[in-house]
């Protein structure tokens, strides 16, 4: 996945509370096998009578979404995160997140930031005013243009995952790749029959044409 270091972007305001994963990515789109799900994200809101915030010209290209508390509660569907990422979002800012959604976001290169009420209100006001915001994961700060940086906290493991752009598979291979390779080499040496190709296996099949 892409590394996250620093982004500078306008932020789209979506301050409603309790936006669940079914709202973010409705169930009828979960059978799709690709991750190009951005066009389905927030499907009901984007087909209502009021233009959805991410479809408004002022917020075109926003990489940051400022949301209300408990964003991403509900089912564990990873499609919700895939849809947000496909929309071009890289950072989500809220007072709180659904626990599984927050973990899924980090695994897919999205930075979820929890802020206290005062800091969240300042960032939300900047989003409404279409004021550019800089998010630095290296410094763990949010800087609203013309203001002093706001610090945020993130677990060291999650910060490292995003800074290095490591998904779970890459992290496992990075830490245990040599041991895995050694195990596979020993297995190939000691039990070679487990590594036969289809052509080699065919040599051991009975010749049914001879009958």
Image: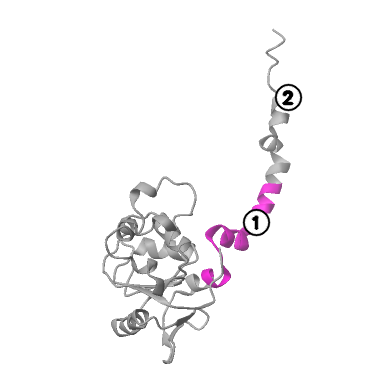
- The residue to which callout 1 is attached is 179
Give the answer, above or below, for where 208 lies relative to 111: above
Can residue 112 be seen in this snapshot? no
Looking at the rendered structure, which numbered label has been put on residue 203?
Answer: 2
Q: Residues within 10 Å of mark 2 (few under 14, many from 20)?
A: few
Q: Nearer the viewer, residue 55 or 175?
A: 55
33 lies above or below 8: above
What is the quadrant of the N terminus in the image?
bottom right
Question: Which class describes the residues within 10 Å of circle 1: few (<14), some (14-19), or many (20+)?
Answer: few
Q: Quadrant of the C terminus?
A: top right
| Distance from Cα at disc 1 to Cα at disc 2 | 33 Å
Residue 5 — which label?
none
* Secondary element type, mark 1: helix
Give, as a single range, the part of the protein colored magenta: 161-185
Measured as percent of width and height from the top left, residue 121 is found at 30, 82
Magenta stretch containing residue 166, yes or no? Answer: yes
> At numbered mark 2, what does the secondary structure look like: helix, strand or loop?
loop
Q: Residue at x 34, y 63 (%)?
A: 72
Residue occupying image coordinates x 68% and y 44%: 187
Q: In this image, 60 relative to 176: left or right? A: left
Q: Is residue 112 magenta?
A: no
Secondary structure, magenta segment, majority class:
helix
The quadrant in which residue 208 appears is top right
Numbered disc total: 2
Most extreme residue toward the top is 211
Q: Quadrant of residue 13?
A: bottom left
Mark 1 and mark 2 lie on one chain; the one further toward the N terminus is 1
Q: Tell me if residue 209 can be seen.
A: yes
Q: Could you tell me residue 36's position as x and y percent?
A: 48, 54
């Amino acid at each position: 996945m892409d590394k996250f270091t620093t982004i500078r972007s306008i932020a789209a305001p979506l301050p409603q509370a309790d936006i669940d994963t079914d709202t973010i990515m409705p169930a009828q789109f979960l059978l799709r096998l690709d991750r190009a799900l951005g066009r389905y994200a927030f499907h009901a809101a984007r087909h209502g009578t009021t233009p959805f915030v991410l479809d408004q010209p002022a917020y075109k290209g926003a990489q940051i979404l400022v949301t209300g508390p408990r964003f991403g509660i509900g089912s564990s569907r990873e499609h919700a995160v895939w849809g947000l990422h496909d929309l071009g979002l890289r950072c989500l800012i809220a007072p709180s997140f659904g626990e599984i959604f927050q973990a899924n976001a980090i695994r897919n290169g999205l930075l979820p930031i929890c802020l206290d009420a005062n800091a969240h209100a300042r960032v939300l006001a900047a989003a409404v005013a279409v004021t550019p915001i800089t998010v630095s994961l290296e410094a763990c700060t949010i800087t609203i243009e013309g203001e002093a940086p706001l610090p945020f906290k993130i677990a060291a493991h999650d910060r490292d995952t995003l800074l290095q752009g490591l998904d779970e598979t890459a992290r496992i291979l990075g830490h245990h790749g040599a041991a895995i390779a050694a195990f596979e080499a020993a297995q190939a040496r000691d039990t070679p029959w487990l590594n036969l190709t289809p052509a080699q296996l065919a040599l051991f099949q009975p010749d049914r044409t001879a009958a």
